[in-house]
Image: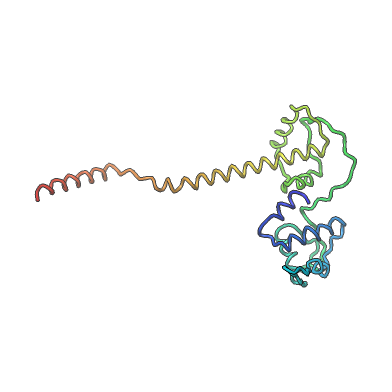
């Protein structure tokens, strides 16, 4: 289970039965390259004889769980079918890592670039959006060019993905703090008394003088 999948499954808007279906059933199918839905098999998986939370699902409940996962972005239909039965699917956030011989480590250069598999590496690090700007890339290159460190291609891609993730989290945090600060300041600004105009001040002074004179006339 990669970091991006875990972030999605932590959502309180996703039911526990749907989370269980994804983590312990659908993901197992994807691992075995058997991405075809059998609603009978799904319902059998969801069936439980628990003394505290017994579950006796049918096709409708199985389909509702799949609909919930689809709406959350955890499963995607690859067949043009409204029904889930017999539907070919994929798990957008699931990454099947290919076993390959690790390449030799090397020092960072000003011409280094992430490879075609960078999106998979990013998802494993918890970064769903693997897009980046030339500024992001150049900043990463220049920082590590000054360090005496060597990594293989996957290692550098993982470090780059983690840098992008940290940078975006910091931007979100700064935006949140700024908005919170502005929200807290607004009531104080509304309560700040307004200074009267010169005409209003003159009128008040005149009224006070008249009231004072009337007091002695009585």
Residue 145 appears left or right of 190: right
Residue at x 81%, y 50% (from the top left corner): 95
Decide if residue 206 is on the left or right side of residue 160.
left
Q: Residue 22, relative to residue 123: is it above or below? A: below
Q: In this image, 39 relative to 73: left or right? A: right
| Residue 177 x %, y % | 56, 44
Q: Nearer the viewer, residue 103 or 138?
A: 103
Instruction: Between residue 112 and residue 181, name the one nearer to us.
Output: 181
Q: Is residue 105 above or below residue 18?
A: above
The answer to whether 143 is drawn above or below residue 28 in the figure is above
Q: Quadrant of residue 165?
A: top right
Quadrant housing residue 169: top right
Q: How many marks?
A: 0
Residue 197 rendering spot, x and y as whole percentages: 30, 43
Q: Residue furthest right?
A: 101
Image location of residue 124, percent across then percent down: 77, 47
Q: Position of residue 183 (x, y in %)?
A: 50, 48
Going 71% across and 54% down the picture, which residue do you hit? Answer: 8
Residue at horizontal 62%, vertical 42%?
171
| Residue at far left of view | 217
**In the rendered view, how is the structure colored?**
rainbow
């Amino acid at each position: 289970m990669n970091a991006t999948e875990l972030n999605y499954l932590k959502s309180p808007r996703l039911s526990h039965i749907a989370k269980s279906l994804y983590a312990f059933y659908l993901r197992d199918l994807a691992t075995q390259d058997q991405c075809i839905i059998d609603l009978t098999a799904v319902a059998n998986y969801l069936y439980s004889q628990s003394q505290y939370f017994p579950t006796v699902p049918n096709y409708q409940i199985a389909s509702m769980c799949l609909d919930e996962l689809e709406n959350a972005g955890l499963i995607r239909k690859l067949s043009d079918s409204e029904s889930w039965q017999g539907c070919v699917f994929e798990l957008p956030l699931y990454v099947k890592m290919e076993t390959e011989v690790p390449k030799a480590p090397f020092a960072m250069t000003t011409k280094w670039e992430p490879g075609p598999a960078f999106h998979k590496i990013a998802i494993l690090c918890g970064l769903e959006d693997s897009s980046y700007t030339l500024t992001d890339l150049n900043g990463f290159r220049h920082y590590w060019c000054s360090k005496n460190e060597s990594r293989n291609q996957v290692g550098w891609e993982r470090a780059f993905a983690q840098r992008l993730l940290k940078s975006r989290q910091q931007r979100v945090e700064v935006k949140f703090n700024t908005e919170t600060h502005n929200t807290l300041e607004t009531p104080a600004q509304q309560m700040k008394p307004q200074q009267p105009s010169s005409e209003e001040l003159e009128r008040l002074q005149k009224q006070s003088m008249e009231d004072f004179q009337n007091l002695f006339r009585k």
